[in-house]
Amino acid sequence: MDEAFVTAALGILFGFALQKVGLTNYSIVINQFRLKDWTMMKFMCTAIATGSVIYLLFQPETVGMTETVPPVSIAGNLLGGAIFGAGMAIAGTCPGTLIAGIGQGNMDYLTAGLAGFITGGLFFGFLFKFFLGIIMTGFLGEMTLSTITGINPWLFTDLICGFVITFYILTSWKTKEDKV
Amino acid sequence: MNITKFFKMKRWSPWTAGIAAGVAASLSIVLTEKTLGVSGGFETIASMIANSAGFVPPSNAFFNRVKPPVFDSQLILLVGIFAGALLASLFSGDFKVRTLPDNEWKKRFGVSKFKRAAILFTGCFLMATGAGIAGGCTSGLGISATMLLSPAGFLFIAGVFASGIITILLIYGRK
């Protein structure tokens, strides 16, 4: 299958899901950080669990390692994540939901949001040499929990699925209680 | 439930929508051997701008080699996400030209469009920098790397949530 076609189709599915779950709205994103609305956490955990199962079902021979596994950099992932998290809490969106938000008609995302991401990309790119110092601190390369521990990846996937199912049962039960 | 009604719903539960996102993220790896990463597309656009303006010195590894100014599938992904959200919001009637975010924003920051633009720009600038350092964003690392069981994803999520919670406390206080 043509890669461009597949990518477009998967993008449509992803954008559709992001809009339907409402993460294209400021309140839903920031209320996760305020611990008032758990939509984002539920959405992400379910996506991770589902994706993890499908990936293992389809690619058992490459389990453990493929070139597509994003490399680990302890300082880069953590510090980059922290800078990203601050920006996400300030803006109330992230790259995927920004694009999806433009799709539902958010004009601020189309103007200031896109401009911010492109300017930030220029900033990062021109100062790449400096940032590379951070990225290379604790750089461990491509690895997975399975390759580190030598344990079958299905164990971790099962744990993630168990966590999501428990999360689902507990929150559904709590919602019912609240209604009573 | 009938299928038309399902697509016309204004909201899907996060569990349902999460399954759809998980299918998209995993099939991206299975079918194209690429993570479903969004922030990379913005970096390519930045590279196209920097290169076409002639501002990129030959010594700049990022705009020459890491993100050369070539049209790639990450840009197609951006178009797809846009189209998907457009379709979803048109089906449900949720599409609307919105110049400011919903009530939560207005309660805290008022109705100034300039203020919104300045704050959104700052947030997105920080996210672009953070995603560059981390090697991805919420989709490429948060969902995709974690799904592949890479510690990169778990570390990224920990960083995002710790910092996001502190930042939002500074903005909104303890209420």
Image (tube, coloured by chain):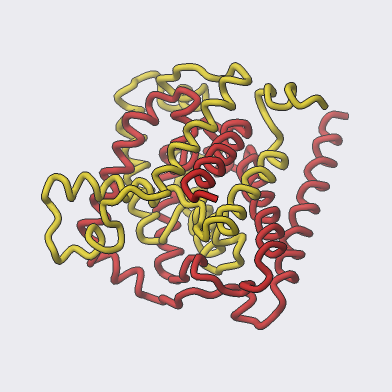
In which quadrant of the rendered view does residue A62 lie?
bottom right
Q: Residue at 34% across / 36% down in the picture?
A: A114
Task: Name the colour assigned to chain B in the rendering.
Answer: yellow
Judged left or right of residue A89, residue A178 is right
Nearer to us in this view, A92 or B80: B80
Give the residue at the far right of this rendering. A180
Give the residue at the far front of this rendering. A1
Res. B170 in view: no
Nearer to us in this view, B157 or B79: B79
Task: Name the colour assigned to chain A in the rendering.
Answer: red
Percent across and percent down for residue A34 are: 56, 41
In which quadrant of the rendered view does residue A106 lie?
top left
Res. A83 in view: yes
Percent across and percent down for residue B64 are: 22, 60
Vertical relation: B2 (above or below) A66:
above
Q: Residue at 46% across / 43% down in the picture?
A: B77
Q: Residue at 53% across / 53% down in the picture?
A: B161
Percent across and percent down for residue A59 are: 65, 66
